[in-house]
Image: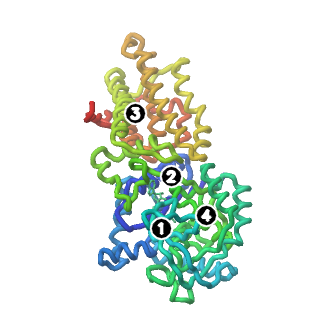
Amino acid sequence: MDKNFYITTPIYYPSAKPHMGHAYSSIIADFFARFKKIDDYEVHFLTGTDEHGLKIQRSAEQQGQDPQKFCDKISQTFRDLSKKLNLSNTDFIRTTEERHKNTVQYLWKELEKNDDIYLSNYSGWYSVSDEAFYNEDEIEEVDGKKMAINSKSPVEWIEEESYFFRLSKWEKPLLNHYESNPNFISPDSRKNEVISFVKNGLKDLSVSRKTFTWGIPVPNNKDHVIYVWLDALTNYLSALNYPNTNDELYNKFWPASVHLIGKDILRFHAIYWPAFLLAAKIELPKKVYGHGWILSGDEKMSKSKGNILDPLEIIKEYGLDPLRYYLIKEVSFGNDGNISQDRLEDCINGDLANNYGNYCQRVTAFAIKNCDGKIPNKIEFQKDDLQILDKYKNNLDNIRLKIDDQNLNFYIDFIVKSLFEANKYFNDQEPWKKKDDPLRLNTIVYTSLEIIRKISYLLYPIIPNSSLKALKIFSLSESDIKLKSIINNESLSKGSNINKIEILFKKIEKKND
Ligand code: MSP
C-alpha cells in the first residue's frame, strides 16, 4: 500500500497581509497532514507564496516599492503565519525562487515541443484581482463598471499579442478523466460545476502577457512573461524538483494526494492544471478538493471588501488551538461558513474547557489522589469499560475511510460524542464511591485514563499543542502518537507515574452572559 502522502495548500498572493481565509486553508491542510503522519504515512506538506503577475506588480507600485523587495517582505508574513498556526509543512515555496523558475520554463518548453502552445493575439476581459480571463457571459455591469459575475471583481479590456495553450484540444480527455476518476474533483457539488463548464466548450487559453514584466520570461521570447497561473500551478511540481524525475521527492510524492484549495480557484486546478499536465505527459494529481469560504456577514472575506478578520488578533485573544478547533468544527467542511466570536467562545467553554480540559483534569486529580499517583497495576475490565474502550477499535477503519473522503464532519462528531460519553462514564461509574473495592476503582481509573490517551491522539491533528500537553500526564510525546494504537485498551504502562496536568483551556467570561 502506498504510504506516502503529498498535500498542498494554494500558494497565497503576497499582495497584502494574510487573513482568516488563508489561515483556514492552511489549518485544514495541516489537519490532514498530521492525521496521515500519525497513521504512519510519510508526509510532504507544501505551502508558499505566488509572487508574480500584474496584481503583485501593481500592489508594489502603489507602495512605491520594487516588486521583489515587496514580495520578500510580505512573503515573510505568510511564513511567519505558518509558524503561528503551528503548521507541520515540510516546505515553503516562493515562485520567485530559482528552483521554481527553472521548472516553469522547462514545462513551457515541453508544452511547446508537443505543439500545445502557439502565438496569436488576445482580446477580451481580464480581472487583475483574480488574475483571470473571462468570457462575455461571465461579465456584468454594476454602476457603469464591468465586473466578473462570480468573484465581483472589476475587469478590464485587454488586447495584446499572446501565446495560447490549446486548451480546447483537451476537452474530451478531461471529461474522460473526470468520468473514470470520480474522486478527482471533490466535493461532488463542485465536480458538477466543473463538468458542465467543460461541456460548454473550452476555448484556448492565453498563457503569456506582454504589457508588463513581473513574471517568468517565456523561453526564447523575452518580450513575454508566462501567465501567472501557469507559473503558480507548477509550484506543486517544482517543490519536488521536477523535471528531475529520478529525484527522491518526485518519486515518492508525485502524483499529489490532494490539492486543497478554496472553491474560488477550482477552475484553475480542475481544468487548466490537469490540461497542462496531460499535454506535458505528466501524471495527474489524485484529487482536487475545493472547500467553501469563510464569510464575514454574507460575503467572502477579502481585502478588497474590507471585511477581514485577522487570525493573529484572534490567536492573541483566545489562543491558537481554540481557533484551529473552531474552524475545523464550526465551518462545515466543503460549505461556506460564517464565523463569529460568540460561537468561538461557546466552543472554548463547552467542548474544550468543559468536555475535554475538565475531563482530563478531573480524572488525573482523582487518580493521583486515590491511586498513589501511579497508573493502576491490577485491573479487570467489565462490560461497561470494554464498551467504551472498544468503540475506538471498532471505528478506526471507518475513521480512516472518512478522512480519505475529507469527511471532517464525521471526525469531529466522533470526537464530540466520545468526550460526552467519557464524561458520562466517569460520572456514572462513581469511582469515589468505590474506595472499599480497589480493583473496581483502579479499573475505572485505568479505563478513564486510556480514554484520555485515545481522545488526545484523535485531537492531535486538530489541536496539537493541547493534545501534547494532555499526553504529558503519561509522559508521552509527539513521536509516541500512533493512530493505530487507539485500538489498544491496555497501552498505559502500569505502575508508572501520573503527571499533573496544567490547565488546558481557560473558560471565557462571555460579555453577554
Ligand atoms: N495565488 C492564488 C493561488 C495559486 S495556487 C497555485 C490565489 N491566492 S490567494 O491569496 O487569493 O488565496 C487563495 C486561497 O486562500 C483560496 O483558494 C482559499 O483557499 C483561501 N481563501 C482566501 N479567502 C478565503 C475565504 N474568505 N474563505 C476561505 N478561504 C479563502 O488565489
Q: Residues within 10 Å of mark 3 (few under 14, many from 20)?
A: some
Asked if residue 498 can be seen in this view, the reply is no
Q: Residues within 10 Å of mark 2 (few under 14, many from 20)?
A: many
Position of 169 relative to 81 (above/below): below
> Cα distance, mark 2 to mark 1?
41 Å
Q: Which mark is residue 146?
A: 1
Q: Nearer the viewer, residue 230 or 210?
A: 210
Whole-percent x, y for residue 330 in the image: 44, 41
> Cα distance, mark 2 to mark 3?
23 Å
Label 2 element class:
helix
Q: Mark 1 or mark 4: which is in front?
A: 1
Label 3 element class:
helix
> Cα distance, mark 4 to mark 2?
16 Å
Reading the image, the residue beneath label 4 is 254
Position of 384 relative to 271 (above/below): above
Residue type at mark 3 is Asp
Position of 398 relative to 93 (above/below): above
